[in-house]
Image (cartoon, rainbow, N blue to C red):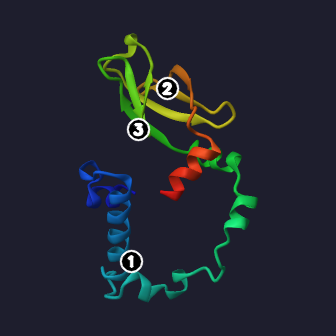
Amino acid sequence: MGTLKRWTEPQTCVSIAEWQERLDHAERLYREEYPLPSGVTRWQQWPGLRHSGRRYSRAWEKREWSLAKALEHLANYTLNRTVSSSGHLSLFNRSYHVGSLLVGKAVKVCLDPQTVHWVVLDRRSAAQLRSIAAETVNRKHIVEMLDM
Protein backbone atom coordinates (compact mmCIF):
# COMPACT_ATOMS: atom_id res chain seq x y z
CA MET A 1 0.00 0.00 0.00
CA GLY A 2 3.05 2.29 0.16
CA THR A 3 2.85 3.54 -3.42
CA LEU A 4 -0.91 4.14 -3.33
CA LYS A 5 -0.54 5.90 0.01
CA ARG A 6 2.07 8.23 -1.48
CA TRP A 7 0.00 8.85 -4.61
CA THR A 8 -3.22 9.59 -2.71
CA GLU A 9 -1.74 11.79 0.06
CA PRO A 10 -4.08 10.74 2.90
CA GLN A 11 -2.71 13.48 5.16
CA THR A 12 -4.42 16.05 2.91
CA CYS A 13 -7.84 14.35 2.98
CA VAL A 14 -10.63 15.76 5.14
CA SER A 15 -12.26 12.35 5.64
CA ILE A 16 -11.76 8.64 5.19
CA ALA A 17 -14.40 8.78 2.45
CA GLU A 18 -12.30 11.29 0.50
CA TRP A 19 -9.21 9.12 0.87
CA GLN A 20 -11.20 6.07 -0.27
CA GLU A 21 -12.26 7.96 -3.40
CA ARG A 22 -8.63 8.82 -4.12
CA LEU A 23 -7.56 5.21 -3.52
CA ASP A 24 -10.27 3.89 -5.85
CA HIS A 25 -9.24 6.36 -8.56
CA ALA A 26 -5.50 5.61 -8.24
CA GLU A 27 -6.13 1.86 -8.22
CA ARG A 28 -8.27 2.10 -11.36
CA LEU A 29 -5.56 4.11 -13.14
CA TYR A 30 -2.87 1.64 -12.12
CA ARG A 31 -4.95 -1.35 -13.21
CA GLU A 32 -6.66 -0.01 -16.33
CA GLU A 33 -4.45 2.77 -17.72
CA TYR A 34 -0.77 2.35 -16.83
CA PRO A 35 0.93 -0.12 -19.17
CA LEU A 36 3.21 -2.94 -18.19
CA PRO A 37 6.65 -3.07 -19.87
CA SER A 38 4.96 -5.19 -22.57
CA GLY A 39 2.72 -2.22 -23.44
CA VAL A 40 -0.59 -3.67 -22.26
CA THR A 41 -2.45 -2.81 -19.05
CA ARG A 42 -2.85 -5.21 -16.16
CA TRP A 43 -6.51 -5.76 -17.10
CA GLN A 44 -5.48 -6.62 -20.64
CA GLN A 45 -2.72 -8.94 -19.44
CA TRP A 46 -4.89 -10.77 -16.86
CA PRO A 47 -8.57 -10.41 -17.84
CA GLY A 48 -9.60 -13.26 -15.53
CA LEU A 49 -8.79 -11.11 -12.51
CA ARG A 50 -11.64 -8.68 -13.22
CA HIS A 51 -14.10 -10.85 -11.32
CA SER A 52 -13.85 -14.06 -9.34
CA GLY A 53 -17.01 -15.39 -10.93
CA ARG A 54 -18.77 -15.56 -7.58
CA ARG A 55 -21.50 -13.17 -6.54
CA TYR A 56 -21.04 -11.22 -3.34
CA SER A 57 -23.33 -12.24 -0.50
CA ARG A 58 -23.60 -10.25 2.74
CA ALA A 59 -25.25 -13.30 4.37
CA TRP A 60 -22.25 -15.46 3.41
CA GLU A 61 -19.87 -12.82 4.76
CA LYS A 62 -21.71 -12.62 8.09
CA ARG A 63 -21.67 -16.41 8.38
CA GLU A 64 -18.05 -16.93 7.32
CA TRP A 65 -16.26 -13.83 8.65
CA SER A 66 -14.00 -14.71 11.55
CA LEU A 67 -12.59 -12.35 14.15
CA ALA A 68 -9.90 -14.93 14.96
CA LYS A 69 -8.74 -14.98 11.32
CA ALA A 70 -8.79 -11.18 11.17
CA LEU A 71 -6.68 -10.98 14.35
CA GLU A 72 -4.21 -13.53 12.98
CA HIS A 73 -3.90 -11.46 9.81
CA LEU A 74 -3.41 -8.20 11.72
CA ALA A 75 -0.71 -9.88 13.82
CA ASN A 76 1.47 -10.02 10.68
CA TYR A 77 1.92 -6.25 10.67
CA THR A 78 4.40 -4.18 12.65
CA LEU A 79 3.91 -0.44 13.05
CA ASN A 80 6.75 1.99 13.71
CA ARG A 81 5.94 4.83 16.07
CA THR A 82 7.72 7.45 18.16
CA VAL A 83 6.31 8.11 21.62
CA SER A 84 5.10 11.71 21.92
CA SER A 85 6.26 14.26 24.48
CA SER A 86 3.18 13.42 26.55
CA GLY A 87 3.99 9.69 26.59
CA HIS A 88 1.39 8.70 23.99
CA LEU A 89 1.43 6.92 20.68
CA SER A 90 -1.26 6.84 18.04
CA LEU A 91 -2.71 3.71 16.49
CA PHE A 92 -5.55 3.88 13.98
CA ASN A 93 -6.72 7.34 15.08
CA ARG A 94 -6.64 6.48 18.77
CA SER A 95 -4.10 7.71 21.29
CA TYR A 96 -2.65 5.27 23.84
CA HIS A 97 -0.67 6.33 26.90
CA VAL A 98 2.51 4.26 27.22
CA GLY A 99 4.27 6.27 29.92
CA SER A 100 6.52 9.23 30.39
CA LEU A 101 9.61 7.01 30.59
CA LEU A 102 9.20 6.26 26.88
CA VAL A 103 8.95 9.88 25.67
CA GLY A 104 10.79 10.26 22.36
CA LYS A 105 11.53 6.53 22.12
CA ALA A 106 11.31 4.79 18.74
CA VAL A 107 9.09 1.75 19.15
CA LYS A 108 7.50 -1.01 17.13
CA VAL A 109 3.91 -2.03 17.80
CA CYS A 110 2.27 -5.32 16.88
CA LEU A 111 -0.92 -7.09 17.82
CA ASP A 112 -0.99 -10.20 19.99
CA PRO A 113 -3.98 -12.06 18.54
CA GLN A 114 -4.45 -14.30 21.59
CA THR A 115 -4.73 -11.51 24.16
CA VAL A 116 -5.90 -8.80 21.70
CA HIS A 117 -3.30 -6.41 23.11
CA TRP A 118 -0.98 -4.01 21.35
CA VAL A 119 2.56 -5.07 22.21
CA VAL A 120 4.99 -2.17 22.31
CA LEU A 121 8.60 -3.17 21.58
CA ASP A 122 11.87 -1.27 21.59
CA ARG A 123 12.68 -0.71 17.92
CA ARG A 124 16.34 -1.66 18.32
CA SER A 125 16.37 -4.51 20.82
CA ALA A 126 12.80 -5.79 20.28
CA ALA A 127 12.41 -5.96 24.07
CA GLN A 128 8.78 -5.69 25.16
CA LEU A 129 8.10 -2.34 26.83
CA ARG A 130 4.32 -2.35 27.27
CA SER A 131 1.17 -4.28 26.50
CA ILE A 132 -2.05 -2.33 26.02
CA ALA A 133 -5.56 -3.68 25.50
CA ALA A 134 -6.57 -3.14 21.85
CA GLU A 135 -10.12 -2.20 22.78
CA THR A 136 -11.17 -1.13 19.29
CA VAL A 137 -9.86 -4.26 17.59
CA ASN A 138 -13.13 -6.15 17.64
CA ARG A 139 -15.73 -7.34 15.14
CA LYS A 140 -17.90 -4.22 15.45
CA HIS A 141 -15.09 -1.74 14.76
CA ILE A 142 -13.50 -3.79 11.96
CA VAL A 143 -16.81 -4.19 10.16
CA GLU A 144 -17.55 -0.46 10.60
CA MET A 145 -14.17 0.37 9.01
CA LEU A 146 -14.94 -1.93 6.08
CA ASP A 147 -18.32 -0.26 5.54
CA MET A 148 -16.79 3.23 5.31
Instruction: Determine whether the residue tagged by mark 2 lies in a helix, strand or loop.
Output: strand
Image location of residue 96, percent across then percent down: 45, 25
Q: Quadrant of the N terminus?
A: bottom left
Image location of residue 114, percent across then percent down: 69, 34
Name the residue: 57% across, 48% down.
142
The front one of 78 and 95 is 95
Q: Amino acid at mark 2?
A: Val
Instruction: Determine whether the residue tagged by mark 1 lies in a helix, strand or loop.
Output: helix
Task: Count residues near mark 2 (Cα–Cα under 10 Å), then give few for <14, some for 14-19, many for 20+.
Answer: many
The front one of 110 and 92 is 92
Q: Amino acid at mark 3?
A: Asn
Task: Count residues near mark 3 (Cα–Cα under 10 Å), then give few for <14, some for 14-19, many for 20+.
Answer: few
Nearer-N-terminus badge (3/2): 3
Q: CA distance from mark 3 to mark 1?
A: 30 Å
Image location of residue 108, percent across then percent down: 44, 31
Q: Which residue is mark 3?
A: 93
Q: Which residue is mark 1?
A: 31
Name the residue: 27% across, 48% down.
11
Q: Quadrant of residue 85?
A: top left
Q: Is residue 111 shown above or below 46?
A: above
Q: CA distance from mark 2 to mark 1?
A: 37 Å
The front one of 126 and 17 is 17
Which circle, 3 or 1, is nearer the viewer? 3
Q: Which residue is mark 2?
A: 120
